[in-house]
């Protein structure tokens, strides 16, 4: 729990956008924490919030077993914003009525706003909002009034300004809602009111001091994958305790081109002990003949732990095991009726034979974009801070079918060319994830007047705000043409390039 900043409490009722609400609040420089709705009173006591946001959820408030909260939450004088289910819950608990009318609203919906509402004053009086509900508020609690409406819903927003209670039937946190972020800003700054004291520079300085005080003269061990989370974790602990930190970098041979060397070089001048284990042959031997993606993932996770254990034994006992757990992991671990804070072991399970006393997770309060900003504040190399999202199993799940060293080398070269061309075109920051996939499909081609029968390579690029949904990136044809020409010309045994134009859903971002 953070005790240094103003805190907004987000009560999670199981909505698909709960994480996104928290990210939007953080983007507005206000610290927030997500708690399961069943722990509301304990959460209020723990966080002392300046405001409360109730998320959406899949239930109907009038059905038996639907998650509810005590009416006293709304009587404490703490400003409350209910979103979708949260708005219906507010009306229901306070004596109003929510019911299914048979007129469902999904997707972008034309909405009319009352300009006298503190949430909407000065904004356009009509606009598009993102709806996702089959239940509507039909009757208002005492003291409330309607503040927005649609063709199907009289109460698209409700409010009781005297008690600082507000409900929105739509989702202001999604980008499809026009001026949605401004509505959240007004709740936070005008109604709560917040001061905007969530700054990454302050967080970095404070967390370094906290880790230094906690660890003292103890020894710390970290599994360094080279990904953003573990790299920023290593940088922060290096600032805190220097060479008391030992990082074990297990290079499983499934990284992208030159990445193992880049990770090693990036930390060469940092005050840590870095042990690199080159284990490609060992991992490939375990993966030989495996074609099913889940089997690959399981083998890689298990083998990673075994290698890490073996190297850790050489070091002997340590005082702390560090993990790059970030806030979405913590939220997932505390879902439902589970405790909100529980260690999320993001290396596939805690090593059984490493002698340590305690776990430290210095990033556990941060979202991914905040982790990147922290990395910048700490002075970490851009190649690590802005590293493309990369699955733990690495290229093993970007080679469809069985794995060989030859296929991995082919994919590494092709992927490097694709990434280089996007960087040359200035698109590497605009496309949120991009990579190449070596398929198991072989087809006939003609190269140098000779018949070929070689592999098809798929290119993938997506844009997204939350990675829950994603749209395929509209990469210009000339950029794709340059990448395709270079790959076919420079990488042996690839004679056909395709571009994946499927969004998520129905597809996933990764192929396996």
Image (cartoon, grey):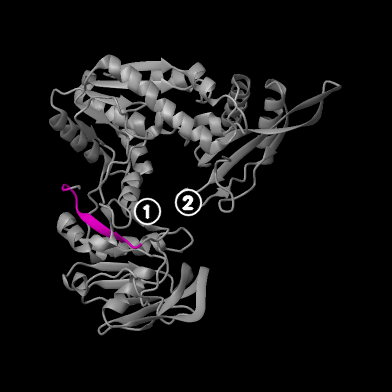
Say if the magenta span includes residue 8: yes
Is mark 2 in CB contact (under 8 Å) with mark 1? yes
Comparing 453 with 367, the one in front is 453
Report the residue at 19% width, 49% height from top.
5
Image-based side of 339 in relation to 487, left or right: left
Work out whether residue 478 can be spotted. no
Q: In the rendering, at what x and y percent does residue 433 appear?
A: 52, 40
Q: Which mark is residue 19?
A: 1
Q: Magenta segment, which residues?
A: 3-13
State the image coordinates of residue 325 (x, y, percent, origin top left): 32, 38
Please, is residue 154 above or below residue 106 in the view?
below
Residue located beneath label 2 in the image: 468
Q: Is residue 403 magenta?
A: no
Relative depth, front residue between 293 and 446: 293
Disc 2 residue crowd, few under 14, some 14–19, many 20+, Cα 10 Å: some
| Left or right placement of residue 24 versus residue 102 in this view | left
User: Which element carries disc 2, helix, strand or loop?
Assistant: loop
Quadrant location, the C terminus:
top right
């Amino acid at each position: 729990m953070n005790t240094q900043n103003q805190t907004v409490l987000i009560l999670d009722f199981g909505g698909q956008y709960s994480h996104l609400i928290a990210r939007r609040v953080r983007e507005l420089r206000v610290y927030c924490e997500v708690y399961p709705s069943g722990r509301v009173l304990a959460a209020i006591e723990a966080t002392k919030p300046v405001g409360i946001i109730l998320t959406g959820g899949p239930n109907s408030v009038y059905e038996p077993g639907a998650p509810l909260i005590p009416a006293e939450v709304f009587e404490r004088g703490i400003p409350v914003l209910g979103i979708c289910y949260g708005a219906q819950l507010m009306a229901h608990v306070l004596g109003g009525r929510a019911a299914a009318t048979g007129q469902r609203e999904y997707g972008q919906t034309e909405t009319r706003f009352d300009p006298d509402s503190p949430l909407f004053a000065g904004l356009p009086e009509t606009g598009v909002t993102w709806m996702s509900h089959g239940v509507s508020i039909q009757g208002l609690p005492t003291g409330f009034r309607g503040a927005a409406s649609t063709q199907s819903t009289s109460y698209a927003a409700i409010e009781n300004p005297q008690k600082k209670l507000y409900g929105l039937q739509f989702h202001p946190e999604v980008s499809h809602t026009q001026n949605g972020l401004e509505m959240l800003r007004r709740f936070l700054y005008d109604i709560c009111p917040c001061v905007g004291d969530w700054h990454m520079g302050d967080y970095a300085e404070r967390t370094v001091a906290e880790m230094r005080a906690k660890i003292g003269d103890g020894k710390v061990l970290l599994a360094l994958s080279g990904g953003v989370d573990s790299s920023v974790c290593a940088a922060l602990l290096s600032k805190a305790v220097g060479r008391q930190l030992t990082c074990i970098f297990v290079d499983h041979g499934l990284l992208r081109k030159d990445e193992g060397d880049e990770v090693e070089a990036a930390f060469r001048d940092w005050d840590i002990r870095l042990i690199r284990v080159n284990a490609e042959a060992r991992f490939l031997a375990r993966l030989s003949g495996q074609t099913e993606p889940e089997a690959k993932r399981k083998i890689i996770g298990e083998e990673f732990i075994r290698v890490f254990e073996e190297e850790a034994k050489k070091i002997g006992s340590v005082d702390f095991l560090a993990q790059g757990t970030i806030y979405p992991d913590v939220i997932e671990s505390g879902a439902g009726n589970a405790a909100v804070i529980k260690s999320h072991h993001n290396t596939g399970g805690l090593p059984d034979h490493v002698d340590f006393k305690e776990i430290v997770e210095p990033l556990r309060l941060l979202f991914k974009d905040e982790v990147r900003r922290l990395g910048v504040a700490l002075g970490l190399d851009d190649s690590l801070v802005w590293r493309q999202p990369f699955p733990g199993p690495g290229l093993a799940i970007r080679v469809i079918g069985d794995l060989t060293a030859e296929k991995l080398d082919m994919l590494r070269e092709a992927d490097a060319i694709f990434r280089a061309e996007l960087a040359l075109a200035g698109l590497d920051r605009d496309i949120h994830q991009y990579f190449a996939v070596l398929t198991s499909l072989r087809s006939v081609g003609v190269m140098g007047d000779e018949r070929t029968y070689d592999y098809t390579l798929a290119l993938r690029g997506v844009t997204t705000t939350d990675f829950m949904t994603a749209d395929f990136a509209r990469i210009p044809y000339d950029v794709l043409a340059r990448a395709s020409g270079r790959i076919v010309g420079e990488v042996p045994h690839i004679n056909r390039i395709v571009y994946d134009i499927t969004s998520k859903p129905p597809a996933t971002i990764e192929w396996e």
